[in-house]
């Protein structure tokens, strides 16, 4: 089983060789297949409130398309280990749950939440996952402005 770790200023992702699509422009039902990359976790501020964010980037080299998805998350530190948290129904939960299902064959939506050691999660995905197919799905929150992301298929490096 693949260990997913369960328990910098403005960034530009523009690339003249690829059509860059941000999560705010992705519509429910859209799908992409390509290489996956998880960025570092950064602390951001919006209207006086701090939150943590990482980027999920899927690069489809065949179709010259790239999805850049900023994922806001809850994070906490315990003994200098940073973990992220996803409650059932949320964007982080759906991403982790569908990745775990695709890579490790676990049942979907069996846990009420996920607590994930972020560095392990990031390193495992970036170093061990060759390709994913991700589909934009309807979020459970009716006020969400962007879709959730569900991993339909994931292929480990051979």
Image (cartoon, rainbow, N blue to C red):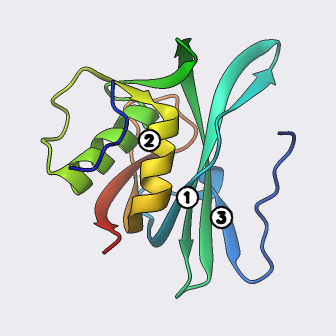
Query: Furthest-right residue in view?
Result: 9
> Which sits earlier in the primary sequence, circle 2 or circle 3?
3
Alpha carbon distance from label 1 to label 3 = 15 Å
> Which sits earlier in the primary sequence, circle 1 or circle 3?
3
Whether tag 2 and tag 3 are in contact, CB under 8 A, the answer is: no
Q: Is residue 2 left or right of residue 59?
A: left
Q: Is residue 66 left or right of residue 62?
A: right
The residue where tag 2 is placed is 121
The residue where tag 3 is placed is 21
User: Does 151 sit above or below residue 87?
Assistant: below
Camera-side mark, 1 or 3 = 1
Q: Name the spot of residue 147 as percent of width and height, x first.
A: 48, 46
Q: Is residue 44 left or right of residue 51?
A: right
Residue pictured at 65% horizontal, 26% vertical = 52
The residue where tag 1 is placed is 37
Q: Is residue 48 left or right of residue 95?
A: right
Q: How many marks?
A: 3
Q: Name the spot of residue 44 as percent of width and height, x first.
A: 76, 27
Q: Nearer the viewer, residue 33 or 119?
A: 119
Alpha carbon distance from label 1 to label 2 = 11 Å
User: Does 78 sit above or below residue 117?
Assistant: above
Whether tag 1 and tag 3 are in contact, CB under 8 A, the answer is: no
Q: Name the spot of residue 13 as percent of width and height, x first.
A: 76, 61
Residue pictured at 61% horizontal, 70% vertical = 66
Camera-side mark, 2 or 3 = 2
User: Does 99 sit above or below residue 61?
Assistant: above
Q: Nearer the viewer, residue 78 or 37?
A: 78
Whether tag 1 and tag 2 are in contact, CB under 8 A, the answer is: no
Residue pictured at 44% horizontal, 36% vertical = 91
């Amino acid at each position: 089983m693949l260990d997913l770790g369960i328990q910098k200023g403005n960034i530009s992702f523009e690339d003249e060789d690829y059509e860059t699509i941000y999560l705010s422009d992705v519509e429910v039902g859209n799908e992409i297949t390509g290489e996956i990359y998880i960025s570092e976790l950064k602390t951001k501020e919006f209207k006086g409130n701090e939150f943590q964010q990482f980027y999920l980037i899927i690069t489809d080299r065949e179709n010259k398309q790239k999805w850049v998805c900023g994922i806001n998350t809850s994070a906490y530190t315990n003994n200098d280990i940073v973990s992220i948290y996803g409650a059932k129904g949320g964007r982080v939960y759906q991403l982790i749950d569908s990745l775990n299902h695709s890579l490790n064959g676990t049942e979907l939506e069996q846990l009420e939440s996920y607590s994930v050691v972020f560095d392990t999660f990031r390193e495992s995905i970036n170093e061990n996952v060759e390709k994913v197919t991700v589909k934009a799905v309807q979020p459970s929150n009716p006020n969400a402005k962007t879709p959730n992301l569900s991993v339909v298929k994931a292929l480990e490096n051979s």
